[in-house]
Image: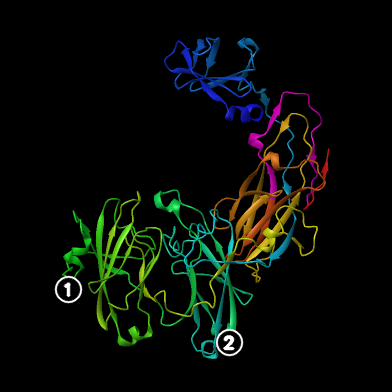
Amino acid sequence: MLEEHGAALARSRAVDCAVATGEKDVFAVLRVDNDGNRYLFVRTNQHDAGRHGRATVRENASGRELTFEYDLKPGGSSLLFLSTGQDDVRKGQWFPKEIPEASPPKDLPGPVVIREVASRSDAGPESWKELATGASLNDAGIFDSRFVSYRASFTLDHKAVNSANNLRLRVIYPTLAFGSWSAGDRGTRDHVLVSVNGLYKGETDAINGDLVLPASELHAGKNEIVMLYQNSGYMKEEAWMEKESGIRCVRLLPDLPVDRVLPEWKMRILLGADNFDDLPDLNPAFDDHDWQTLKVEKAKGDQIEKGQAAIFRTSFEMTAEDIESGQTGLMVSQLSDYGLILCNGEKIGKTHSAITSHTLDMAGAIRPGRNVLAIVALAENSNSRSGLGLPYLTWPLTAGIQPDLPIQFSDESAGIKGKWHQGPYNEGGWTMKSLPEAASLDQSLLDWRQLVFQLPVLREGLRIPWLVRLFARGEGNIYINGNHLGRYSESGGQHDFYLPGCWLKHGNREGNIVTLCLRPGPHGSGVQSAEIIPYAAYAEQLDVASSAAVAPSATSTGTPTWTS
């Protein structure tokens, strides 16, 4: 119905009518399109029983009247289409139309086991754009979860690369703590993979965005760092849906001293406090010996409920040498909707987002000896529990070696620009491999795979939905014949992907192509196994004249053959 009338119906207008259906829970509405065709909608909101009767619809302006019989299932609806000038309801078309009765099909084709895969490494973007300071991907007009590459260069002197200590690459993206319930979480947080001077180095840490770079693998002069950013999606919960993704800044820090986690805290729920700034609890000399003690070990806090506020206190020791080193920053992986942070009674910052990590500089407040931190958290918007996430002492945002030039970004890798997901591997650069692929880590941040298969021409009336059952290493996107099918994750639980029939080819010797664009996981990227399988439970044989069934041959390869 929508294929035939959808465009005209979308531009139709309602007609003011007097309606009598004989039932208080049966409703009728009349619409007319620009050509004068009329659409009469009839429905019931009664879900316990069907509705049957006679109805009359009279147009108030013209006086034209339609009388018709309706037969509705519980909660059902119907549509009567009347062409221009037609008032005889017997000559109209009722929708939905009756579907021919189907019988369980027999002799279904078996699965196609794909034996080979074509593989190709992606060299990355050829053209780059400059990223405005502090800009998110949303600011750059990218709102989906495509792969985005970032590039930064650092000029190092001989002293930096000949140091006995390594360097740490720190990548800051405010949504670093998104979904990170623990440091080991890999399923919902965003990911950043790093290549240094053309060599793949791994993934940044889940909590603070760090990756250790051995000084021996850097060199005096210009060093190029390329990062591949994967936005893992948007949690369907309040502010998390408005996450602004993307890398904001990157810098090189000394590997030592290491960050100091602050897990031991005291907490008190605040009752009726309107002005958090004047709480006596914020005074470093305040006695909190009878407060609740707790350990903060998760990236996302869970100490308070919506509408609650709490104050958290802890203390830590610093030497004059510690302060002189410049490691005077405080990073909180996540804090409730509103946060107020003080060090030794001095305010060092306020926060207004529960979905970002926060790095603040305590240089003006910190001193040798004992220091007291006090943090107020107010949960205003989240329906789930929130509070104080994992805090630790670190480097402030101004510390470290900054990039030579502003960060650059690109959402067009070589494979995306070349539209590798749309065509077969009939050009150079592809390598054929047998399945399963051996586990390996090459130097690419992105790799592509293509799997080719053929489907039979089905006998008349036989309808079979198909799926691809895929086991692979890595994370990324999956396509069927150039159409984006979804996302694949080795850490996720989905291995069966429905293949829409409108995107499939039957009996075409060019075959169908499943394409994967993958970033490496812990064991690299690659396909272990792939099968094209009929959804037998949803196959149907319509009651029409049939011909001989077509079945697959006993053995299938990357380009299977079929016999009758």
Whichever of callouts 2 and 1 sits on the residue coming sooner in the sequence is 2
Could you tell me which residue is drawn at 41 percent across and 82 percent down? Answer: 257
Residue 322: percent from left, percent from top: 34, 84
Q: Is residue 499 left or right of residue 153?
A: right
Residue 140: percent from left, percent from top: 54, 59
Q: Quadrant of the C terminus?
A: top right
204 shown above or below 558: below
210 shown above or below 164: above
Residue 467, quarter of picture: top right
Give the mark toward the camera: 2 or 1.
2
Is 540 covered by the magenta stretch?
Answer: yes
Numbered marks: total: 2
Disc 2 marks a residue whose amino acid type is: Ala
Q: Quadrant of the N terminus?
A: top right
Q: What colouring method underlies this structural image?
A: rainbow
Q: Secondary structure at mark 1?
A: loop
Could you tell me which residue is drawn at 65 percent across and 66 percent down? Answer: 127
Label 2: few (<14), some (14–19) or many (≥20) C-alpha neighbours in 10 Å: some
Pointer 1 residue = 285
Q: Secondary structure at mark 2?
A: loop
Is 342 covered by the magenta stretch?
Answer: no
Residue 462: percent from left, percent from top: 73, 31
Pointer 2 residue = 220
- Cα separation, mark 2 vs mark 1, equals 49 Å
> Which dot marks residue 416?
none
Q: Is residue 77 left or right of residue 363?
A: right
Boundaries of the magenta span? 531-557
* Contact flag, marks 2 and 1 (Cβ < 8 Å): no
